[in-house]
Amino acid sequence: MTQIVFSQTETFISALEEWNEKTTNTGIQDYETLLFILINKLGQKGLESPTVEVLRERLNYLVEVQKIDEDLLITGLVKFVSETLEKNIKSHGSNILFHEEIVNSGEFIEKSIEILERLKSKSYFPKAEIELEVWEKIVSEKMSKSNRNIWENERMKELSSQMNKVMNSISNDVWDLFKDVPIGKLKKYVNYEELAGMSLEEAKEIRKNIQI
C-alpha cells in the first residue's frame, strides 16, 4: 500500500499542479481560470490573482475554522473539476455560438475571436479529451477510495485524541456534578471544552439549571 504523506487537501492541490504540468501544451482549459473558478465557488470573491496558495489557504480556512467536512469538500471539488473538463467537450457547439454572438455584438471582440480560433481548431477535441483523461488518471491514483478511507481514519484518530485531552482536563469534582446527566441533555447547557476550563463553583451554577 502506498504511504500517504499529504492530507486530503494537499493531495487535491498536488493533483491540480500535476494536471497543469502534464497539460501545459494542450491549452484548452486555462489553469489560472480554473483556479479562479474554484476559489470563487468556495466563497472568496473579488480575487484578481488566483494562485494555488490562495486556494490552499481558503480550503484550510473552511476545514479548520468553519469545520466543513474535508472529505465532502474535496470530493466535491474533484467532481467539479471533472465536470468542468467534460463541459469543454460536451458544450463545444454552444460555446462557439456564444462567442460568435459576442463578436457580432461588437463587444469584447478580441478575446472572443481568440477563443473562437481555439474552439474551431481541428485539434480542439483531441486536446480537450487529453485534459480530461489526464485528470481522471491523476484522480484515480491520488484520490482513490482506499486513500479516502485512510484520511478518514486519520481524522477520527485526531478527533479522538483531542477529545481525550479535553476529557482528561476536566476535574473529578466537576465530573461528579454531572455524572447523572445524560450526555445529550448536558450538551444543551455546556460542552466538554467549557467544562475543562470551569471552576467547581461555576459548574454548580450550571448544574442547578439542569432538571433530570
Image (spheres, helix red, strand yellow):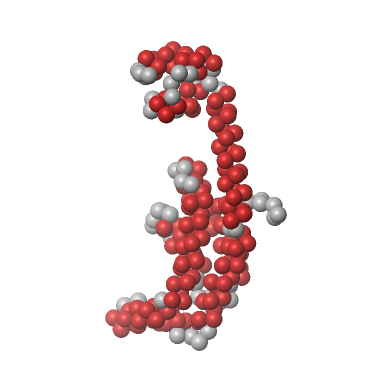
Q: Can residue 174 be seen in this view?
A: no
Q: Quadrant for the C terminus, please.
A: top left
Q: Quadrant of residue 136?
A: bottom right
Q: Quadrant for the N terminus, please.
A: bottom right
- Residue 195 location in percent, x, y? 47, 22
Question: Residue shown at 46%/76% (left/top)?
Answer: 89
Query: Looking at the picture, does residue 44 appear above or below residue 138?
Result: above
Question: Residue shown at 59%/38% (left/top)?
Answer: 158
**Total numbered labels:** 0
Q: Relative to residue 161, is residue 208 drawn left or right?
A: left
In the image as oriented, which residue stretches furthest toward the left? Answer: 105
Q: Quadrant of residue 112?
A: bottom left
Query: Looking at the picture, does residue 91 appear above or below residue 182?
Result: below
- Residue 33 location in percent, x, y? 46, 66
In the image as oriented, which residue stretches furthest toward the bottom? Answer: 122
Query: Looking at the picture, does residue 117 appear above or below residue 52?
Result: below
- Residue 122 location in percent, x, y? 50, 87
Q: Can residue 167 be seen in this view?
A: yes
